[in-house]
Every structure is written in structure tokens, then in C-alpha cells.
Amino acid sequence: MGKIANLLGRRRRARMEEDLDRELRYHFDRRVEDMRAAGIAEGEARRRVAIEMGGIDQVQEDVRETWTWRWIEDAIRDARYAARSLARSPGFTATAVLSLAIGVGASAAIFSLVDQVLFRLLPVREPERLVAVDWNGNSLSYGWGPGAYMSYPLCRDLMKQDRFFDGVLCRFPTVVMLASGEGHQAEPVGAEIVSGSYFPVLGVVPAMGRHLDEQDDVQPGAHPVVVLSHAYWQTALGGAPDVVGRKLLLNGFPMTVVGVASPRFRGMDIGEAPAVWIPASMKAQATPEWDRLLDRRAGFMQVFGRLRPGVGADEAQAGLLPWFKTMLDEDMRREGFPKVTAEERAKFLASTITVRLAPLGRSNFRQRMDRPLVVLMAATLFLLLLASLNVASLSLARAAARSREIRTRIALGASRVRIATLLLADSLLVALAGGSLGLVVAPLVSRSLLSFLPQEAAGVGLSPAMDGRVFVFAFLVSAVAGVSCAMAPAWQAGRVSLIGSLNQRWSGGADVRARKALVVGQIAFTLTLLVGAGLFVQTLARLVGQGPGFETAHVVTFGLNLKRVGYSQENAQRATQRILAELRSLPEVAGLGVAGNTLLQGENWNNFLTVEAGRRFVTDRPVDLNPVTPGFFATLGTRVIAGRDFDGRDARPAGETGGPRSAVVNESFARRYFPGGSPVGARLGLGDQADARADMEVVGVVRDFSYRNLREKTEQAFLPLFEGTLSGGWFYLRVRGVPEPSLASVRTAVARVDPAVPLMGLRTFDDQVARSLTTERMLATLSTGFAAIALLLSVVGLCGVMAFVVTRRTTEIGVRMALGATRGRAVSLVVAEAAAMIALGTALALPCIWAAGRVVEAQLYGVTAIDAPTIAAASLLLTLVALAAAMLPAWRAASISPTEALRFE
Amino acid sequence: MPPERFPIPQGTLDMLVLQILSLGPAHGYAIAQRIEQISRHAVQVNQGSLYPALHRLEVKKWLSAEWQASETGREARVYSLTKVGKKQLALEKESWDRLNAAVKLIFAGNE
């Protein structure tokens, strides 16, 4: 917008300059000619004329000044005039400014988050040269994350590919227990385990000390150093100036702080801002449960490269392929390569490598949030459009009220453009006021939005503060809204006929039609938002109503990991036994079970299973797995519907080693793989490899309950876990009475064993359920709020138009009533007009609802995007509210006495 | 003894320009020439202030301008009086006459 105006202004200006130049040259030449005619020599004549004219440059400068003044004066005059005239109609001004403030505020708030999550480039050197390097195909690796991830040794191989890369790095995000010093309580914090090349390749500068480098990533276990995030340094260490050189306890292991990152750099994953960066060489200390740093079949590292200048991602991908294929070949001949079927081997060898530009890094948070954020952004844009329609409609009404003034101006010789400029100044002023107010509101909306995110995501690194980009967005949005609001009245003004317009009473027929069209648009948008809100509210209600599949009211949960606070395996087992005993001794504890993986936190462990039941087959998709102790099902209150729960029989006899001997499966598993039969007695084996041993006997079937989240209904298999071997896990307690008081007693019970042991996520299970529904709740709450505001805005719009319609038809109504029409008949006249608008708006909304449905589909549960009852309910609500709004002016019309109505003319 | 040629008093150039143009459209050079001719060279137009004045009057919409072939055949920027300009000229003349009369009265009183 601004650019075009600027361009036009510049071209116009250039033409004016050229004209002036020609004009003055003409004068100069004529004067010289005249002097020569009078007998003065040419040189002398030129000299004299130059003196006479006081220097051409000076004249040009003086003329230019008159131009500039006009523009500034005009602009100031228009703005002053607009401000005065707005102040004279405070009702209009307040409604218009507030409407826009709501629209701009909401969309700026959402835009701020969308920008931070979806658009912001990584704050590193030349992020546009960063690429993500992925494995594409079957890597035959133990699954940690998507199969695209690579092993650390493979990353080191890639580092040598300097034909394409100016450096390669890898990272593994995880959670570690960090204590800010000896004797301090350890807290779970986000961490990034990174290759030594991480900071040098990204090219970021530390705020203090130094970053990790290649020298910190040479010998596994030999580099106990970390870099802290600026936020962690500030909050956990109070910004201590002497932090570099201090020792922290990472999972109970002492590590020296060598530097603090810049506050701008928060890792490569928006949504998972780490508190600490750990060199890959210390992976065994950072994740004591599993190391596998040097295992070529452990794909857990996300690999990024920095392309050499001039090298494209495609070029790098194609160039790397020969090397990659050779690597596959070598890998297969390596010792320890898994025994696989010929088919799998072929799949492995068919793997390729993918190189994609990744200037934004890679973020699970982004993948999870992008759809909801796009939905919210769309909703706020609808809201903004609605607010603009409202202001446009109000502006039309105002222009109509000012039509006499406008026509007077036209009669006095003001050009159409001049009138349009005046109206534009009016709208722009309103828009900018609305936009500014919107920016004041935006951080509040943004903050409440962030509060919907789970508390653990405090490290998300999202900020409710509005930055320059949001200001630009809000300004553009307001300006566009302002200009488009001025369009309708300016167009109307252009159509006012000049001849006789001063004394002619203006019927305003076209004007009413335009305003009605705007209201129809508002109704359509409002209905769309109402339907959206209805769908999200139902989704949330269905999920809450359905629950995880067991009675949650009396369950308390927490996680424990003793090896992460410095315990050895034996001590951890002993302490866990004591903790279990302490918990069982609590009077309110009615049941206790432990699981290897937590429920409803998005985590899971899955693998294909090989099944032997008469014949041998592999499950056609991965089965969700979880090791649980005997009594776990009873604690949750899940019924065992066939066979039995785990018990002592499932443990291997003392001295015998090996994996689990038995398994329990859920109903979904039984239904999918044993339709009509019972899986009890069948044998299962982990994995789909040809040499997978199916030696776990299915001993029972349990009812389905949720694992990763409330939405998914998956096939699950449970493996036995025995209390004597535990060094931690996820604890589930069934308590008597309300669960909240038990949180404190659980904490003291564990503290009796070791007060330094941190409990992860200690909360009631109801709380856990609520936390797992943050996105759904955010969508339901915000969309309902937006729909309510939309409803309010369109009621204001409808009310305004109806009042106008009534004023226009006052005479007609008066005549009708004088001729004996009842009051009810008069009301229905007006209401019929409103009903027609509502009906048309509803009809127009249907395609909008259909299109919006495409966008929201993935977010819904238990309800389809095109849900007839929801649409019906929403339009009923809208119709009732809108008709009620129309009744008011209608009733007023009918209350006018016929004589008064006739005098109105 | 008064000087041979008057510089134009502040603020009166606008009026003179409007007056000249009320006789017919003219370009800048012609306007200057005519003011000097009609005043029998008693008034001297300062060339450096003529063009700013013309543009100022154009900005105020009292004049309009157009490129036209001049008497020499070369294109010149020709100014003409607008409707608003005519009204303005009438107003200025009236107030000038009133001021003139008042000044005369004051001088007459002193004699």
C-alpha cells in the first residue's frame, strides 16, 4: 500500500520538477532574447537576466516550498477536520474504534504467536543456508523418534562431506535433572545433547564465557562441561556473575559451566527451549538409562548441515547419495548388524538421504501447534473482517448523516477526490485509533493464550510481548481496514448527483442496500465462527466425557528416576523398594502400580510384534507397549476381561536371565488380531525381524484405556515389571477420598527415604487429563470468545441498520397504522426485513462453514466438520439473537403515533 | 523625490497577477511584462518572487495552468484564472479599495 502511494507521489513529484524547470528556462530564454533585441550582447544579457531572476536555484527552491506546504497543510487540515468531526459523534467513534480494537487486538495477538512459532528464522548466522539431513527409508535402527533421525557415528561421517557442507551438527533434545550446586534440589529441565560442531556451525555468540566446541566432543565421558541458557542462568542462578567455572549436578554428575548462551538464542526448537547444552561425549551421563552414542543402529540424532555458499539443497542431496549408498553397504557388513529378512535388507539398501532447507530449525512443538494456530489465525481474521464490516456500515450511516455537508462541498467546487480524501482521513483516523488500542489489548490476549499451554512449556520461549513485526502487522491491518471502510461511503459520495442535490431530499436507497449487504456478510461470518466454536466445544466435551477409559477421580501419579540423581543401580533398587513401602503405609493408599511409561503425556514406546498362534505373523502396524507391575490394572480400576493380571508366575526364576516371559494385551489388540477368538495362550515377540523370538505368552486381556493421549485408540500390549528390579518409573496410586491432600503425603513419604529425590509431575490424574487437553481447551475457549464477540458485533451492525430502516419507513408505517394496521403488523413489517437479511447471511455462511471445516477437521474429535445439529443450533442461536436485536427498533417504529409519523416528512 | 521604479509591496503581487490574468490567460514571462507595461514601468516585478507566487496561487486553486504553444511557437506554461480566483480577485479589489480610501482619508486629515 504505502509503497504504491509513495511511488505515485514520487512520479508526480518528478513531473512537477520537470515542468518547473521548463517554465523557468522559457522565462530565461525569452528575457535574453528581448535584451538581445534591445542591442545587448548575448553574454551580457545572460548575466543580467541571471542576476534579475535572483538565481534560478533559489527560485526553484521557493516554488518547491509552496508545493510541500500544500501537502502538509492539506494533510493536517484533513486530520484536524476529521478529528473534530469524529469528536462530534462520540457514539460512532467509540463503537468504530472498539470494533476495530477487538479485531486488531485479537489478530495481532495470534499473529505474534504464529510469527514466533511458524515464521521466525533461527537467530543464527545465515539461517537460510541451514538444511535438515534425514534418513529416508528403513534405517533398521532402534526407534527413538521418527525413523528419519540418524546415529551419532553417521553424523560424524557426514561432517567429512565438506564438498557440500560448511559444517554438520547433530542434536538430541531430552530432559535431565539439574541441581544448581551440591546440596541443591535437582529439577527436571530441558537439555540439548549436541555435537561439538553445534555452536561453531550455527555461528552464535555466547553472552558469557565460551560455547562448546569440537574439543569438548572427543572422548566419551571425558568432557564434563555444559553451557547454560540465559534464562536458566537468570532464574536458577540469579544471574550470578561468577557462574563460569561453577560446578552443577547433572543427573547427580558434576559438570562445569563454561559459558552462558545469548538471550536471543534458545536452541533449535521453538517450544522446547533448553536450559542446558551438553556435549554428545557426555551422553551416558545425560541419559543414564541408555547410551548407544557409538551404536550405528541407534537413530536418535537430528542432523543439520550448513550448505557451502552456492550449493543448493538438491545438489547436496544428489551429491551425497553415492557416498550414502556405499555407507549402507559397509554398514551391512559390519559386526553386530541385525539379522534381517531379505525383504528388510532390500528396504534398508533402498534407503536414501534427504536434504531440505530448514532455516527455522525443526520443531515438534511447531508440528503440534501449527494447525491450531492456523485455525485461530483464520478465526481472528474472520473477526477482523467482521469488525471492518461493522465500521464500514457505521461509516456509511455517518456519510449519510453528513450527506448534506458533502453535497454542499461538492456544490462549492470540491472535487470528488477531495471528498473521498476527507472520508478516507476520517476512516484512517478511526482505524489507527482502533489499531493502537488493539495493540494495547493484544498482549493481554496473547498472555491468556500462552496460559493455555502446559506449565512444563514455561521453557517454550514464547513471549506475549509485541515486537516490531507485530506492530507492522497491526498497522497494515488497520490501514487496510480503514481504507476499505472508507470505500463504501466514498463510492456513495461519488454517486451523489450534483444538480439540485442541495435542496433535494435524499432517499438513500442505494445506501441502505449497501448497509444491508454488509450486515448479511457479518451474519455469514458470525455463523461460521459460531459453528466453529460449537465444534471445538463439542470436541472438548466428548474427550472430557469419554475420559481415559478408567475412573480418574481417585488416582494420583508421579514419576521417579533415581539413577538421574546419582544412585547406582543397586542403591536405586533398594531405595525404590523403601519408597514403595512408605507409600503403601499411607492410610489413604488403596492401590499402587508402576508403569515404565507415563500415561497421557504424549510419550509412548512401540514396536511391531511377531505373533505365534497356530501360525506366525507380524502385526500390520506398531503396537503400543508399556511395562507395568502386577496390580497396575487394579489400581487404575481397569477390568481384566479374559485371563489374569500379571503376578509372581511371570517373573523369571532367580538366576535366569532374559526378557519378559508373558504379556497382557488390550481389547483392541484382541479384536484386531484375534477376531472372534481369544489371544490368551498366544505367544508374542518384540520386533518384526526374522529372528524375533516369540516367547512371551499372552496371559490376559484388559479393557482399552488411553496411552499417549485421549484421542488415540490403539492396540496395546503390556509387559510384566517387578518391583524388586525398579530404579524408578511412573507411579500410580489409588487413594481413598479426595486426591489433592494425598499430594503432600506422597511427597513426605518419598522424602522420608531421601529428601533430595525430585518427584516428576506429581499431580492428580484429573489434573493430568486436563493438561493433556490444553490445545483442545485453548481452541474451545478462544473460538467461543471470538464467536461471542462476533455475535455482539453483528448485533450492533444489525441494530444500526434496522434503526436506519425504521427511520426511513417511519412515514410508511405511520400511514399504514393510520389506515388501521395493528402494532403487531407494523413490527412484523420491520422484522421481516431483518429476517430476510438473516436468512441470506445463513445461506452465504454454508460454503464458508464447508471451507472452514476443511481447516479444522484434524482438530476435531467425535464430531464431523460438517455437523448438521451444530449448524442448526448455531443458526438458531444467531437468528434468535438477531431477531431480538431487530425487535427493538421495530417496536419503536410501531410506538410512533400516526400523526407524528406523518409530520416526520 | 520618489524613486523611479517601485518594488512591489509585500502581498500585492498576488492581486496584480490575478488582475492581469482576469484580462486573459498568460505565461509567467508575459505576466511580468504586462505588469511593467501597464504600470508604464513604474512597477518592477521581482522575477524571483513571481514564480513562487504563481505556484502558490495555483496550489490555492485560484489559477490553473496548462502547457500551450506561445507566440514564439515554443511551449510555455500558461496560467488562467479559475472561478474561485475570480471571486478572490473581487474580494481583494474591494478590500484594497477600502484600504486605499482609508489611507487617503488619513492623509487628507493631516493636511
Image (tube, coloured by chain):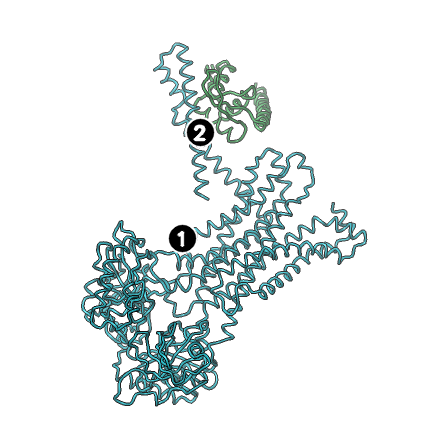
**A432 shown above or below B26:** below
Q: Nearer the viewer, residue B15 or A564?
A: A564
Viewer-proximal residue, A615 or B104?
A615
Q: In this view, does A15 lie to the left or right of A341?
A: right
The residue wearing badge 1 is A468
Helix, strand or loop at disc 2?
A: helix
Residue on which the image places disc 2: A63
Sequence-first disc among 2 and 1 = 2
Please rate how many residues cluster around mark 1, counting C-alpha atoms within 10 Å: few if below 14, some from 14 to 19, many from 20: few
Give me the chain letter of mark 1: A
* Res. B48 mark: none
Report the residue that reaches farthest toward the front.
A615
Q: According to the rendering, which colour does chain B have? A: green
In the rendered image, which quarter is residue A562 located in?
bottom left
As drawn, the residue found furthest toward the top would be A39
Quadrant of the rendering where the C terminus of chain A is positioned: top right
> With B42 as the anchor, is A261 left or right in this view?
left
Q: In which quarter of the image is residue A628?
A: bottom left
Judge whether residue A747 can be spotted in this image.
Answer: no
Per the rendering, the colour in which chain A appears is cyan
Where's residue B22, x and y in %? 56, 21
Amino acid found under the numbered disc labelled 1: Gly
Helix, strand or loop status at disc 1 = helix
Distance, label 2 to label 1, CA atoms, is: 38 Å
Q: Residue at x 44, y 61 (%)?
A: A371
Q: Disc 2 is attached to a residue of which chain?
A: A
Seen in the picture, residue A897 relative to A535 is either above or below; the reply is above
Q: Can you give x and y, in whole percent of width and height, for residue A531 in the image?
A: 56, 62
- The type of residue carrying mark 2 is Val
Q: x, y (%) of residue A246?
A: 23, 69
* In the foreground, A21 or A573: A573
